[in-house]
Image (cartoon, helix red, strand yellow):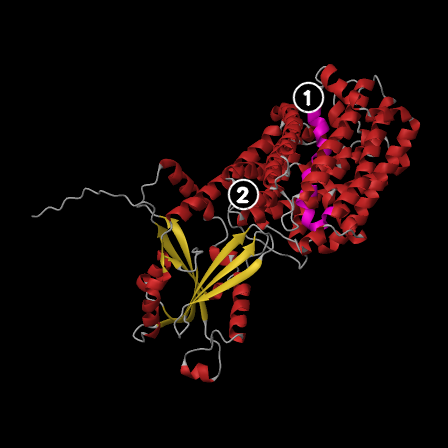
Amino acid sequence: MESKHHLDKLSAAGILVAFGIIYGDIGTSPLYVMQAIILNEKITEEIIYGSISCIFWTLTLQTTVKYVILILRADNRGEGGIFALYALVRKHAKWLTVPAIIGGSTLLADGIITPPISVASAVEGLQLIYPDIQTIPIVIGILTLIFIIQAFGTKAVGRAFGPIMVTWFVMLGVLGVYQIIEHPEILKAFNPKYGFDLLTNHPGGFWMLGAVFLCTTGAEALYTDLGHCGRENIRISWIFVKSCLVLNYFGQGAWLLSEVGNLLNSRKPFYEIMPEWWLLPGIIIATSAAIIASQALISGSFTLISEAIRLNFWPKVRLVYPSDQKGQLYVPSINWLLWLGCMAVVLYFKESANMEAAYGLAITMTMIMTTILFSYYLYLKRVNLWIVIGFMLLYLTIEGLFLGANLLKFAHGGWFTILIGVLVAGLMSVWLRAFYIKLRLTEYTKLEKYVPALHELSRDISIPKYSTHLVFMTNASRASEIETKVIYSIFQKRPKRADIYWFLHVDTTDDPYTMEYKVMADDDDDDNIIKINFRLGFRVEQRINLFFRKVVEDMVMNKEVDITSRYESLNRQNITGDFRFVVLERFLSFENDLPFVEQLVMKTYFFVKDFTTPEDKWFGLDSSSVKIEKVPLIIRPVENIKLKRVYS
């Protein structure tokens, strides 16, 4: 109820945050959309009215109706985004993993081209003032700076984002109104007939949809940042944002009416509608908006990866929380991979006009996958089946048309984002498949069978004490079970005598911010075998060292456990006993008889795992008190070995 109240709470501060966080991508689209639509076509009234009509109705149907009105309803305890939506429905159908992986990977892939196209489109305005200026070094410099500052967090800078974006949208609206006054006949483009005629009658008109689609590419961000801004703040702020966007697009159309019969060449309608005296300030504001758009997208990619890790879609890479602000996250590996991708885009495509030809193909796939997941969500909510079918057919048709039109971009650079998307989806699939293979083949045993043996080992002074408190990370979710590998480590690998044995397990919940734990102690008076199950949401940082310390403090306060040292001299001084963590790291044993596909999956899994964050660092354990033990993942051992003994 609290999260619902937060979502539906309307405030001036919340609206300002929404301006600064979620509208960067969709808000900077006027920089390049009209140029992408007209390209090398001769400017005609049919193209002008038709394209403006298509833009208006795309923003209305795709962004306003689908995302702002409908999909924002599907919140997961206040959180949004394709993985949050997947977490709401995944328990009901396994096949939903497919659209979740495709949607997440294409969203991440298309994000590589968004910062370059936004920044390049803004910076290229300088060529109107300085025709010979080289914009590529400037674009590379700005993008590199954006990626460098990620490590320091953007809390202070973030406060300025809202006012800058408000200034940007006001500028869009004012520039548009100025041109509409000159050519009010452009308002006829509200009629959808002009858009329909362009798509059906103009030669090659259908393929223009690929460029029209660019006006709504940031719609997914509205949903992804639901938790940061709140549903009502997004809905109210979108009224203003859409009004300014529509005014600017109509203003660009109005200017184009004065250019009928001419070619656009390399001119940008966005900058052409600016008074000459406003060019430099306009370029500065546009570049600032493009930087904010890039920052928001990079932050969104970090959030996407952190969710993917907790949903077993992605390797456990290092996560950094640079400030105490909720949602502030930095993923170094993804940051620099995105930077490399952006540099490749800038150096390969060179100009924003070339990037436009490649942009939008992958994000169409994300929107189609969101439609499928949301349709299933509506079905689970017992919405009338005909309404569910109607919604799904309508939007799969619309987005299918956009996908078909965008396929033309494949040969012009769209292959780049599709290739990245395929690689990311491949890694996600391998990681999830490996997780289930390990889950299926990990052996568990009843903990109660070993309780007497653990008590005896704890009292056996003939064995050197390993630690006062010995803590194992375990995958066994049931309170009564423990992995056989843990038992093997305690009794056979090297007998590990301790006064208290702790077994910690972490369950990742579909609720994003769950932070709960349950303690299970054995019934013996000694209480020296304790199992703790943490239930943490898929957006909660897994700082197990900190959480475990809190649990121990609570148990000591409740007199459930005595953690003072058992050494007599230290006990008299009331000194806390030492804690030692044991983390078991598995490796693929040669002694296995896996099917070829599963063996390939596991070999890929362990190869990638060598480059990722170790288990102890992922769980936030104090490295000075952690023992890493390598244990073989003996999967389906080879049987029927025909070995013959000979006698001399």
**Alpha carbon distance from label 1 to label 2:** 36 Å
Looking at the magenta stretch, what is its main secondary structure? helix
Give the answer, above or below, for where 466 lies relative to 296: below
In reply to whether residue 371 is colored magenta, the answer given is no
Question: Where are the magenta residues, as a range?
Answer: 209-231
**Label 2 packing within 10 angstroms: few (<14), some (14-19), many (20+):** some
Give me the disc on residue 90.
Answer: 2
Query: Which three-letter amino acid code belongs to the residue tagged 2?
Result: Arg
In terms of image quadrants, where is residue 25? top right
Numbered badge on residue 207: 1
Q: Name the amino acid type tagged 1.
A: Trp
Most extreme residue toward the right, as rendered?
A: 182
Q: Is residue 279 visible?
A: no
Q: Nearer the viewer, residue 487 or 314?
A: 487
Residue 46 picture location, percent across and down: 80, 18
- Mark number, residue 334: none
Residue 184 to residue 383: above or below: above
Helix, strand, or loop for circle 2? Answer: helix
Residue 329 position in % (x across, y down): 63, 53
Residue 635 placement (x, y as % from top left): 34, 46
Which tag, 1 or 2, sits closer to the chain's start?
2
